[in-house]
Image (cartoon, helix red, strand yellow):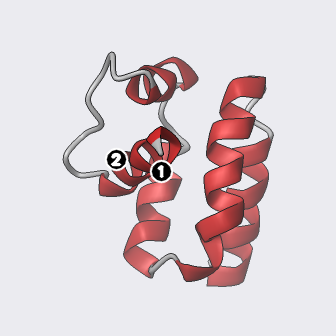
Amino acid sequence: MNIDLRKKRILYRSTHRGCKEMDILLGSFITKNLSRLTEQEIEQVERILELSDSFIFDCYQHKSEPPEELPVLKQMVREEDK
């Protein structure tokens, strides 16, 4: 799949999760950073979008640790903490 289509899908999926909190948390990060993500980071975001909302939200609340293989999720949490 070409990179532009993947980015469009990521933007849509990050802002239409079905959980308003996730739409805001993920959507704001993706809207701000999508244009400068590398191919590897895009792959990580696609994997993050497969995770459950409850797990991602727990990461944001520091109840769960983001997986080591998903440093983009750690970056998302750090940016939200600022």
Residue 82: percent from the left, percent from the top?
47, 45
- Residue tagged by mark 1? 79
Instruction: Identify the residue at horizontal 30%, vertical 21% (top origin).
Output: 64
The mark that comes first in sequence, 2 or 1, is: 2
Answer with the quarter of the image where residue 43 lies. bottom left
Q: Circle 1: is it few (<14), some (14-19), or many (20+) Cα within 10 Å?
A: few
User: Mark 2: which secondary structure?
Assistant: helix
Q: Residue furthest left?
A: 68
User: Which-is-in-front pick, marks 2 and 1?
Assistant: 1
- Type of the residue with mark 1: Glu
- Type of the residue with mark 2: Lys
Answer with the quarter of the image where residue 53 lies. top right
Q: Is residue 23 left or right of residue 70?
A: right
> In the picture shown, does residue 24 fall above or below 46?
above
User: Of residues 33 and 15, which is closer to you in this image?
Assistant: 33
> In the picture shown, does residue 72 fall above or below 3?
above
Q: Is residue 2 visible?
A: no
Q: Is residue 36 visible?
A: yes
Q: Circle 2: is it few (<14), some (14-19), or many (20+) Cα within 10 Å?
A: some
Number of the label disc, if any, that sits on residue 74: 2
User: Of residues 17 and 58, which is closer to you in this image?
Assistant: 58
Answer with the quarter of the image where residue 25 lies. top right
Residue 21: percent from the left, percent from the top?
70, 26
Residue 61: percent from the left, percent from the top?
43, 21
> In the picture shown, does residue 29 fall above or below 48?
below
Residue 70: percent from the left, percent from the top?
31, 51
Q: How far is mark 2 from mark 1, CA to CA?
A: 9 Å
User: Mark 1: which secondary structure?
Assistant: helix
Instruction: Identify the residue at horizontal 47%, vertical 49% (top origin).
Output: 76
